[in-house]
Image (spheres, rainbow, N blue to C red):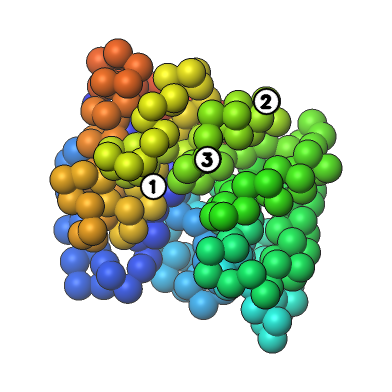
Amino acid sequence: MLLIDSHTHLYSEQFDHDREEVIQRALDHGVQRFYLPSINSSYYPKMEELKNKYPENMFLMMGLHPCDVKLDSYEKELAFIENKLSEEKFAAVGEIGLDLFWDTSTLEIQKYAFIKQIQLAKQYKLPFVIHVREAFNEVLEIVRKEKDTNLYGIIHCFTGNLEQAKEFVDLGFYLGIGGVVTFKNGKIDQFLKEIPIEKIVLETDSPYLAPSPFRGKRNESSYLKIIADKLSDIYEMLPEKIGAITSENARKIFKL
């Protein structure tokens, strides 16, 4: 089975002691491509190092995570992003969005950074990858206003309801499905079949959100097969077909 992990933080400190082994395990399990979302500028050297070491496998995004939108640094971070996008080729702008789970006090600057990065994605004709937590209504409101022919991307780690899933798909987005789909209380497995498999991409979000039976432990890209197997049950398709369709979906989005 050939797979693409559309969202993995392989540069995370949690992989510092065994990163090469983790990557090799994923390659051995058929994961051919890894898309690395940006959190903030401090991680960029490690991301670049991975890309240079595995040029056929690693693809970088550029963006500012909503939890890292801070009053004393967000303008400098946005300037870094704008500069990098003008200098280098990236697979997407991401991960960007809104997160009201950890801190609601930064909502206005989160919105500003989100809109600014959407506009940069459209300027460079790139997809963008949205992080949304406790803020589906706010994200949808912004995306509706920004919709045009250059707006498309992925809703990373989708955990919303069917109505929200359908609206995001109608707006031009694919849903990133990861470990949550295997959780007993994850809920999305109950309606996911109503979303065409042609609008789904696979992701791990490693080292976070490991699928069952590894829930609560460090996640890694080799576990992507567990996600494919779960979708095989939901869509009543062979895992190999799930892998083929979702990988083609990822190629369409990232255009690499």
Type of amino acid at the residue the image marks with label 1: Phe
Task: Name the side, left or right, on which 61 lies relative to 185.
Answer: right
Quadrant in the rendering for residue 134:
bottom right
Instruction: Write the residue at 54% across / 29% down.
Output: 162
**Identity of the residue furthest to the bottom in this view:** 72
**First along the sequence among labels 1 and 3:** 1
86 vs 145, nearest the viewer:
145
Type of amino acid at the residue the image marks with label 2: Asp
Asked whether the viewer can see residue 195, the reply is: yes
Residue 160 numbered mark, or none: 3
231 vs 24, nearest the viewer:
231
Instruction: Write the residue at 57% across / 31% down.
Output: 165
Q: Are marks 2 and 1 in contact (CB under 8 Å)?
A: no
Q: Are marks 1 and 3 in contact (CB under 8 Å)?
A: no
Instruction: Write the residue at 23% across / 58% down.
Output: 216
Residue behind mark 2 = 170
Type of amino acid at the residue the image marks with label 3: Gly
Structural distance between the alpha carbons of marks 2 and 1: 26 Å
Instruction: Write the residue at 32% across / 21% down.
Output: 234
Residue 244 pos. (x, y %)? 36, 22
Task: Name the side, left or right, on which 236 lies relative to 73.
Answer: left
Q: Are marks 3 and 2 in contact (CB under 8 Å)?
A: no
| Vertical order, 43 against 169 (above or below) | below
Residue behind mark 1 = 34
Structural distance between the alpha carbons of marks 1 and 3: 24 Å
Residue 199 pos. (x, y %)? 52, 25
